[in-house]
Image (spheres, helix red, strand yellow):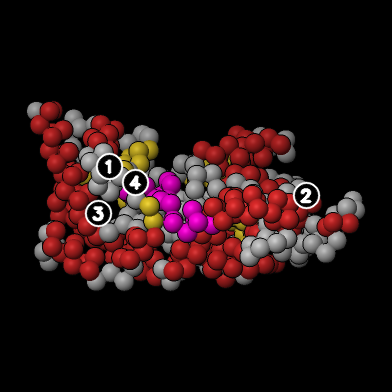
Amino acid sequence: MTFDTSLEYAQQLDANDPLAPMREHFSIPKQANGEDEYYFTGNSLGLQPKLAREAVLELLDAWQQRGVKGHFEGDYPWMPYHEFVTEHAAELVGAKAEEVVMMNSLTANLHLMMVSFYQPSGKRTKILIEDHAFPSDHYAVESQLKHHKQSVQENLLLWTPREGEELLNYDDLFEMIDQHGDEIALILLPGVQYYTGQVLDMQRITEKAHAKGINVGFDLAHAVGNIELALHDWQVDFACWCSYKYLNSGAGSVAGCFVHQKHTQNPELNRFAGWWGHDKSTRFKMENTFKPIPTAEGWQLSNPPVLSLAAVRGSYETISLAGGIGELRKKSLLLTEYLLGLIKAELGDRIRVITPDDPAQRGCQLSLMVNEPGLNGKALYSDLESQGITTDWREPNVIRVAPVPLYNQFQDAYHFVRILKACLNKEANHVR
């Protein structure tokens, strides 16, 4: 079957795309020539939704006009502000509202969750992560082991790709669970592996781990807003995510946290406590006996950063305008498949895509490696950037490209491959 590589076909796909108007809800960075950038870095920092800007400005105006009274007055008073985004967050991760809270930052939340879900006891002292975990996750896990006076060398288990492969193999993971199941206290894995873009089978991993009495948590930084999730039904113990990638809430924006309902109503579960996690009805009595809220809110420490949450609210409302994650995923599957087809048709084996071929095992990110002798991937990445293409470089040798369904067009994918091909030819001519 011949793949249609024409610009006209890309334009036809855009004309038939029900989500095409969503692009107008975002501010697109400009090239030096005044034209829109070809922006493929929503997996690192999503573009600014216009509603996010409006929500932040509204909050600044409320602060200017009301001062401290803004905590209780207006359409969106600050005291319960985090509650205005809870339903949206729960929908995105497949959870009940009481299982979700927006608070802190991603790694801070991972630490707070490990306070509750990594309690080494007896021979059950090990934590299992993947070998190429995002560095912050690796640092967090190592420091938790050290905090509990556990040897990192003896208690950190690494799920590693097989020799000569980039993708993680489930047979290897399940063998580790079978072999060390009664020694593992926690498994902490990504929902989507940041380097390869591989989507992990969170449901099956959780089932295998729970059968051995192991707690399971996921870092969903690259999963939320990218793929459909069902954390409650999958019985995941906890999950954490940032909100500045596919959730488009601005650099360093407040993060999210999921704690399964089976844990939220256990006041004896170990945790680090703060007053914002205390029973709302008695919080301002200023008593010193902690009574946790029987929801994920019980893990809050301090009052939330409302300026950041305003951007989160505007972003979530934008996603709702698109029809939610189900509609985004439908377009994402088509858009990513189209981009992959273009790469294969136009570039053949000059570019190696290490992201899984199976659409169910990938989100919208494709991780590309230059597969042509003498060509330098980092130089190619820089050349693309000079041509108005914003992608993402990850050491040692991957260009990450994420066609985001909220604002990327099929024509963006067409022009990306066109420019990539031209840059490859130019680099190849230099080598010759």
Residue 147 is inside the magenta segment: no
Residue situated in front as seen by the camera: 146 or 50: 50
Report the Cα–Cα distance between label 4 and label 2: 40 Å
**Which residue is disc 3 drawn over?**
412
Cβ–Cβ under 8 Å for marks 3 and 4: no
**Mark nearer the N terminus (4 vs 2):** 4
Crowding near the residue tagged with mark 4, few <14, some 14–19, many ≥20 C-alpha atoms within 10 Å? some
N-terminal label among 3 and 1: 1
Q: Is residue 46 magenta?
A: yes
Residue 403 lies left or right of residue 376; in this view the side is right
**Left or right: 65, with 382 as reference point:** right
| Tag of residue 15 | none
Q: Nearer the viewer, residue 48 or 109?
A: 48
From the viewer's side, name the closer residue of 313 and 389: 313
- Give coordinates of residue 322: x percent, y percent: 41, 68
Q: Where residue 203 sits: x, y (%)?
A: 52, 64
- For the residues labelled 4 and 1, say whether their Cβ atoms are less than 8 Å apart: yes
Q: Which mark is residue 29?
A: 4
The kind of residue on which mark 1 rests is Gln
Query: Dot 4 lies on which element?
Result: loop
Image coordinates for residue 372, horizontal then vertical, percent: 18, 37
> Label 3's element?
helix
Q: Residues within 10 Å of mark 2 (few under 14, many from 20)?
A: some
Residue sitting farthest toward the front: 65
Question: Could you tell me the amino acid type at mark 4?
Answer: Pro
Residue at numbered disc 2? 274
Q: Which residue is mark 1?
A: 31
Residue at 39 percent of width and 56 percent of height? 26
Give the residue type that dot 3 points to: Asp
Q: Secondary structure at mark 1?
A: loop
**The image quarter in which residue 217 lies:** bottom right
